[in-house]
Image (cartoon, grey):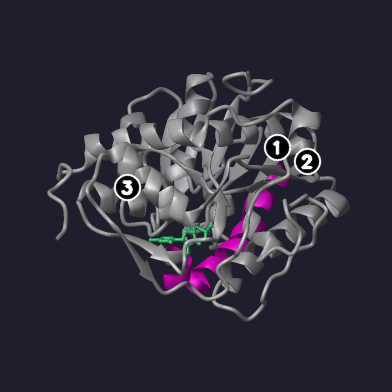
């Protein structure tokens, strides 16, 4: 089993994008482990409600702050020993709606987060993505694969933003000796995703619970490897606790087609929904599965939660928080 948390304790952490889905889980986990947490967010795609339950806890501060602005370096003055940098729209629907903000987040935003870490002598962890591999020609994807990204396609605002962030992070490490690591996350899902964030898991669950058709893009044969949020947190915190400056893949091993994901959500929700085939997004990657040998060998990490179990837990969350119960089948 992975340890529930890190292999070391941090005194005070900065979590940029801390009011997002993943960021809010990280804030909570760090607080549980006795770390003080500054949660910085501009609330573009994150939500204050994700961290409402943490606001009264000792050592927690929410700081409304746009990391893209140079001023943020002064505002975020916690003398951190850990900077977890997540601030960036992460769902395709969000980054397509905010293309310039996404590019700014990966350039100026990442630079400022790195400056904070450098100033404080903190360990820095960049949350990068499987999207740096684009529509990969190597399968499964290993960290030494350079990727297949269309630099002028609609997804490039995210892919190139994250690739630039990786370059910045590496340059800080090389030039200034910043203790900067990189994780590449693959399709993390779980409680606290926004029902309307557009990604496949929350969309299918919402549709199934509402008795609406599940919108399968293309013929649904494209694949993704889902990783439950708890596993992602374990992986991220293990990379943070190491001194690795190499990118490390963190993702699930259960590769499934989008159509299989849709059918499984229908089965697990007990919904009468059907599937409806809709247009496939431009440059939508065809196959995606991480090679996680490096995380396993370096850190002893591997995902623990099978996707059916993770889906069950996520469905329970959506049932508990949704104002609407599973409705009658759409006919
Ligand atoms: N997808 C889908 N229906 C939806 C949302 C997404 O079929 O309502 C597909 C999408 O085209 C992609 C896969 O599910 O092939 C994963 O999409 P997501 O937006 O979750 O993340 P991505 O892996 O593309 O970043």
- Labelled pair 1, 2 in contact (Cβ < 8 Å): yes
Q: Main secondary structure of the magenta part?
A: helix
Q: Eyeballing the image, is 31 above or below 162?
A: above
Q: Quadrant of the C terminus?
A: bottom left
Regarding residue 329, the answer to whether it shows in the image is yes
- Give percent across and percent down for residue 224: 56, 52
Q: Quick check: is 6 in the magenta stretch?
A: no
47, 113: nearer the viewer: 47
The quadrant holding residue 54 is top left
SS for dot 2: loop
Query: Could you tell me which residue is drawn at 16 percent across and 58 percent down?
Result: 330
| Bounds of the magenta segment | 94-121
The quadrant holding residue 162 is bottom right
Q: Who comes first in sequence, dot 3 or dot 1? A: 1
Regarding residue 65, the answer to whether it shows in the image is no
Q: Who comes first in sequence, dot 2 or dot 3? A: 2
Say which residue label 1 marks: 122
Say which residue label 2 marks: 179
| Disc nearest the viewer among 2 and 3 | 3
Say which residue label 3 marks: 205
SS for dot 3: helix
The count of marks equals 3
- Give percent across and percent down for residue 22: 48, 42
Query: Could you tell me which residue is drawn at 66 percent across and 76 percent down?
Result: 150
- Give percent across and percent down for residue 25: 46, 35
- Labelled pair 2, 3 in contact (Cβ < 8 Å): no
Q: Quick check: is 101 in the magenta stretch?
A: yes
Label 3, label 1: how far apart the Cα atoms are: 39 Å
């Amino acid at each position: 089993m992975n340890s529930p948390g890190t292999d070391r304790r941090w005194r005070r952490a900065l979590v940029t994008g801390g009011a997002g889905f993943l960021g809010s889980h990280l804030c909570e986990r760090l607080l549980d482990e006795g770390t003080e947490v500054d949660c910085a967010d501009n609330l573009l795609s994150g939500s204050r409600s994700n961290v409402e339950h943490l606001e009264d806890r000792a050592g927690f501060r929410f700081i409304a702050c746009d990391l893209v602005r140079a001023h943020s370096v002064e505002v975020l003055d916690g003398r951190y020993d850990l900077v977890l940098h997540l601030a960036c729209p992460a769902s395709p629907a969000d980054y397509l709606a905010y293309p310039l903000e996404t590019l700014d987040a990966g350039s100026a935003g990442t630079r400022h987060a790195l400056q904070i870490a450098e100033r404080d002598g903190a360990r820095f962890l960049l949350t990068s993505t499987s999207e740096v591999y684009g529509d990969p020609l190597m399968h499964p994807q290993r960290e030494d694969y350079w990727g297949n990204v269309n630099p002028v396609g609609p997804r490039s605002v995210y892919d190139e933003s994250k690739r630039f962030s990786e370059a910045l992070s590496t340059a800080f490490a090389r030039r200034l000796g910043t203790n900067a690591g990189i994780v590449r996350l693959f399709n993390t899902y779980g409680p606290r995703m926004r029902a309307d964030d557009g990604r496949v898991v929350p969309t299918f669950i919402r549709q199934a619970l509402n008795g609406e058709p599940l919108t399968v893009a293309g013929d649904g044969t494209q694949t993704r490897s889902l990783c439950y949020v708890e596993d992602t947190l374990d992986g991220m915190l293990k990379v943070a606790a190491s001194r690795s400056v190499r990118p490390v893949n963190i993702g699930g091993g259960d590769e499934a087609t989008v159509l299989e994901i849709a059918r499984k959500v229908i089965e697990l929700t007990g919904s009468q929904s059907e599937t409806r085939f809709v247009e496939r997004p431009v440059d939508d990657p065809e196959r995606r599965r991480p090679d996680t040998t490096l995380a396993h060998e370096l850190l002893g990490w591997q995902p623990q939660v099978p996707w059916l179990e993770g889906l069950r837990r996520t469905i329970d969350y959506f049932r508990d928080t949704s104002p609407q119960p599973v409705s009658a089948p759409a006919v």
